[in-house]
């Protein structure tokens, strides 16, 4: 296997069909497609001739092998209730964008009554936080057997599956309990947690029968872990996750073993280590730490494991304070370090704007968007905010670089549907973009007004000038 960071676009280009003018992949040329493949900004399946033409089958297989990540991708769940973990190519995020952000699961134990189960499931379902234009959420539910009663476990799973919108992890070391859970979730592709040196024979049988992914665990014994990996692979099971052990009493060892495992996969290209890593901050709840410190320690361990390559975390707390910093950290850590931080272009609605409300324009640079949107909200103004794609550059830089253009504004107007939402045709652009006001008017057909240089003055600008600018119909 050749590391993707050592491949050249030309090596990929030579294996592509190279049909001139095809553009079915959405790129202008095969070389552009090859470059995006290497930067993980597209996928091989978008090259239709490569996929559909039998004469290119060998090339497709060669490319698949070249582009295969050292850490295997594992799918948990199906359809809309699916989470993908793993798929990592590198150890260090500055080398290449990290795929598939760390998934966060919260446990539901089978000793809870129905109302408590539903309450916890609803917390997991409904947790969300709006951050720089993105909605940050939790990902999975880990149903944990503490009663070791297969029937009780089945009952809990049925409740969770009825009320949950998330994929499920079956947490037990008892093969009978696992079997009972798989009968309930036969078509749902849950993750089994966990197979150990004591139960692996029966768990292997269940995994082969139900064709589900499984976690292999060996607390603090990496040799046992890899021995089990080799055994499962020998019997045709490759949808594996690894739990090398989260030990609250020895976090130094925990971080070392996670680092070693990922290093072995990505740097030494050892395929026996090339599977997603599972961290269990939940284990802090079984330690002797003071009760009022448990939430803090769980959050801290989760944060450390996320940075140290955990692809999935299993947690217990239902305190929002535990997850808010964690999902923000995850968002930032999994952003592409090679690009300016950006938000999705499009329309944002602030407050309850009517058909005469102001329409403002800004760029999709994270900091610019955050400042502008928060300043509008703080001013208690009802408005429409159009975010144009400037590739993550701020206003002054994007104007100078030719990213903030009339066509970019026209595009977001067309795609957002704003023309059907307001009766006026007036845009307020940033003061720093005033020199291209004429260009924007020509491209959009809208009247363009230059707003203040500083977004903190937007409130005063709108309150003192908007009615005059837009005319008598404004409110």
Image (cartoon, rainbow, N blue to C red):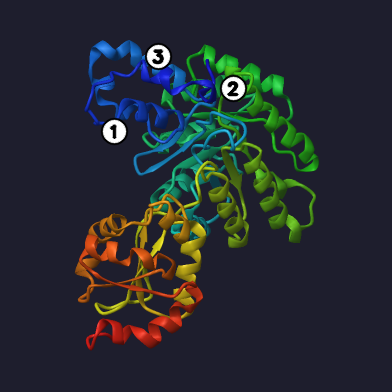
Secondary structure under tag 1 reads loop
Tag in front: 1 or 2: 1
Residue 164 in sight here: yes
Q: Nearer the viewer, residue 330 or 217?
A: 330
Mark 1 vs mark 3: which is more N-terminal?
1
- In this rendering, the count of numbered labels is 3
- Specify which label sits upstream in the sequence, 2 or 3: 3
Point 45% across, 28% down: residue: 38
Judge depth for marks 1 and 3 and give the one in front: 1
The answer to whether 234 appears left or right of 60 in the picture is: right
Instruction: Give the numbered dot on residue 28.
Output: 1
Q: In the picture shown, does residue 292 fall above or below 217?
A: below
The answer, for residue 118, to whether it is visible in the render is no
Near-viewer residue (437 or 157):
437
The spot of residue 39 in percent (x, y) is 46, 32
Kindly identify which residue carries mark 3.
62
Is 89 located above or below residue 316 in the figure? above
- Hey, which quadrant is residue 175 in on the image? top right
Q: Circle 2 sits on which residue?
A: 200
CA separation in Å, label 2 and label 3: 34 Å
Q: Between marks 1 and 2, how big is the CA–CA gap?
A: 51 Å
User: Of discs 2 and 3, which sits in the foreground?
Assistant: 3
Query: Counting other residues with Cα less than 10 Å from the Cα at mark 3, is it few (<14), some (14-19), or many (20 or more)?
Result: some
Which residue is found at the position 52% from the left and 45% from the top? 335
Circle 1 crowding by C-alpha within 10 Å: few under 14, some 14–19, many from 20: few
């Amino acid at each position: 296997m050749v590391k993707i960071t050592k491949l050249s676009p030309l090596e990929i280009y030579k294996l592509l069909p190279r049909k001139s003018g095809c553009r079915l992949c959405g790129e202008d040329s095969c070389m552009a497609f090859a470059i995006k493949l290497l930067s993980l900004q597209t996928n091989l399946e978008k090259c239709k001739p490569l996929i559909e033409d039998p004469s290119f089958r060998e090339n497709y297989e060669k490319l698949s092998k070249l582009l295969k990540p050292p850490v295997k991708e594992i799918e948990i769940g199906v359809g809309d209730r699916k989470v993908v973990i793993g798929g990592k190519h590198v150890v260090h995020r500055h080398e290449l964008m990290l795929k598939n952000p760390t998934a966060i699961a919260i446990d539901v134990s089978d000793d809870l009554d129905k109302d408590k189960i539903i309450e916890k499931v609803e917390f997991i379902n409904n947790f969300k936080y709006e951050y720089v234009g993105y909605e940050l959420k939790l990902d999975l539910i880990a149903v944990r057997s503490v009663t070791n009663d297969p029937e009780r476990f089945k009952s809990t799973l049925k409740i969770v599956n009825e009320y949950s919108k998330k994929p499920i992890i079956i947490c037990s070391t008892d093969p009978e309990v696992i079997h009972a859970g798989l009968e309930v979730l036969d078509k749902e592709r849950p993750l089994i947690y966990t197979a150990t040196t004591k139960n692996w024979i029966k768990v292997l049988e269940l995994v082969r029968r139900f064709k589900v992914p499984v976690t292999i665990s060996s607390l603090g014994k990496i040799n046992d872990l890899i021995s089990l990996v080799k055994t499962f692979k020998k019997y045709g099971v490759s949808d594996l996750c690894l739990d090398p052990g989260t030990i609250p009493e020895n976090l130094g060892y925990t971080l070392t073993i996670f680092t070693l495992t990922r290093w072995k996969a990505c740097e030494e290209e050892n395929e026996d280590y090339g599977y997603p890593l599972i961290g269990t901050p939940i284990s802090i709840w079984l330690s002797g730490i003071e009760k009022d410190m448990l939430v803090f320690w769980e959050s801290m361990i989760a944060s450390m494991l996320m940075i140290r390559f955990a692809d999935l975390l299993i947690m217990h707390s239902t305190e929002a304070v535990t997850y808010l910093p964690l999902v923000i950290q995850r968002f930032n850590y999994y952003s592409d370090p090679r690009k300016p931080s950006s938000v999705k272009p499009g329309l944002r609605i602030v407050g309850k704007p009517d058909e005469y409300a102001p329409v403002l324009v800004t760029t999709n640079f994270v900091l610019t968007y955050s400042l502008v949107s928060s300043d509008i909200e703080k001013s208690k103004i009802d408005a429409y905010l159009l975010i144009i794609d400037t590739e993550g550059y701020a206003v002054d830089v994007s104007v100078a670089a030719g990213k903030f253009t009339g066509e970019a504004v026209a595009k977001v107007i067309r795609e957002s549907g704003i023309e059907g939402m307001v009766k006026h045709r007036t845009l307020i652009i940033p003061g720093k973009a005033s020199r291209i006001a004429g260009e924007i008017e020509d491209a959009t057909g809208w009247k363009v007004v230059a707003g203040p240089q500083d977004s903190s003055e937007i409130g005063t600008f709108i309150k003192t000038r908007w009615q005059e600018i837009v005319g008598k119909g404004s409110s």
